[in-house]
Amino acid sequence: LSFEESYIFGNSYVTMLEDGSFLLYYGGGNVFNTSSAQQDEATGQYLNYFGKPLQKTDEPARLYSLMRDLMHLVGKTGPIVISAWLMSHDHWDHIQCFNDFCKKYTTNVTVENAYANFASTLETFNANNPGGWRTSGLTNALSLVNGNGKYIKVHSGQVFWVRNAEIEVLYTHEDQFPGVIGYFNDTSTVFRIKYHVTDGKGNIT
């Protein structure tokens, strides 16, 4: 999903897996952000990257609509199932849409699990530009949607499967220890995802 219209800086990647469920990476923000946008001197309007007036977008609705479109494209019906939602760190421009999405689609969507390794307040003491959502915000949002989704805290070297996606954890902020985290972006978790074609029984074809 692209965020140029509203000058949001996060990312949101959506993959449909073989069974029609979705793997989401990040979620993006969900605000009308003018902090770094250029302002037109004549009109006073804030402009996006393309020199057009900023638009206030509903990112959870855009995300939901995209998944519905993808299901329709392959003839899938029924509720949306998000089998995994991966997140790097808890800056607003990566997790705000996730939070608002769970609040908005409480009964329309199933979220099975969220995967991350959010740093604690103690680990990021005096770090520059800290996030403030933390693990409790993630688990609270998960509790709003179907699926009894869990927060799964990942660690470097782990490899796990979600449907036909093989996910490897390459890095978490724990790998900096005993070094001190000076900048909050350094708490990001790095994933590598390989998508396999299978026979539906766990055998790679």
Image (tube, grey):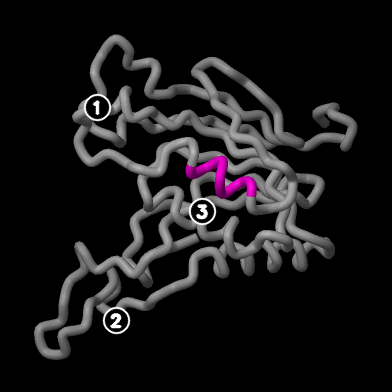
Q: Is residue 184 found left or right of 158 in the rendered image? A: left
Q: Type of residue at label 1?
A: Phe
Of mark 1 and mark 3, the one earlier in the sequence is: 3
Q: Secondary structure at mark 2?
A: loop
x then y, percent, for residue 189: 44, 30
Choose top left, top right, bottom left or bottom right for residue 127.
top left
Q: Are marks 3 and 2 in contact (CB under 8 Å)?
A: no
- Picture quarter containing residue 7? bottom left
> At x 29% / y 81%, what residue is drawn?
53
- Location of mark 2 (residue): 53
State the residue position of label 3. 99
Secondary element type, mark 1 = loop
Nearer the observer, 162 or 147: 147
Give amino acid for label 2: Pro
Compared to 62, does 27 lie above or below?
Answer: above
Which is more N-terminal, label 2 or label 3? 2
Location of residue 153 in the rendering, given as x and y in whole percent from the top left corner: 55, 26
Amino acid on which disc 3 is placed: Asn
Specify whether residue 17 is painted magenta: no
Q: Which residue is mark 1?
A: 125
Q: CA distance from mark 1 to mark 2?
A: 39 Å
Res 170 label: none
Query: Circles 1 and 3: CB distance less than 8 Å?
Result: no
Q: Magenta segment range?
A: 137-143
Compare residues 146 and 188 and report the one nearer the observer: 146
What residue appears at the point 11 percent right and 89 percent down from the top-left corner?
A: 42
- In front of the other: label 3 or label 2? 3
Instruction: Please determine whether, in this image, residue 83 is positioned above or below residue 170.
Output: below
The secondary element bearing badge 3 is classed as helix
Q: Earlier in the sequence, mark 1 or mark 2?
A: 2
- Relative to 143, residue 156 above or below: above
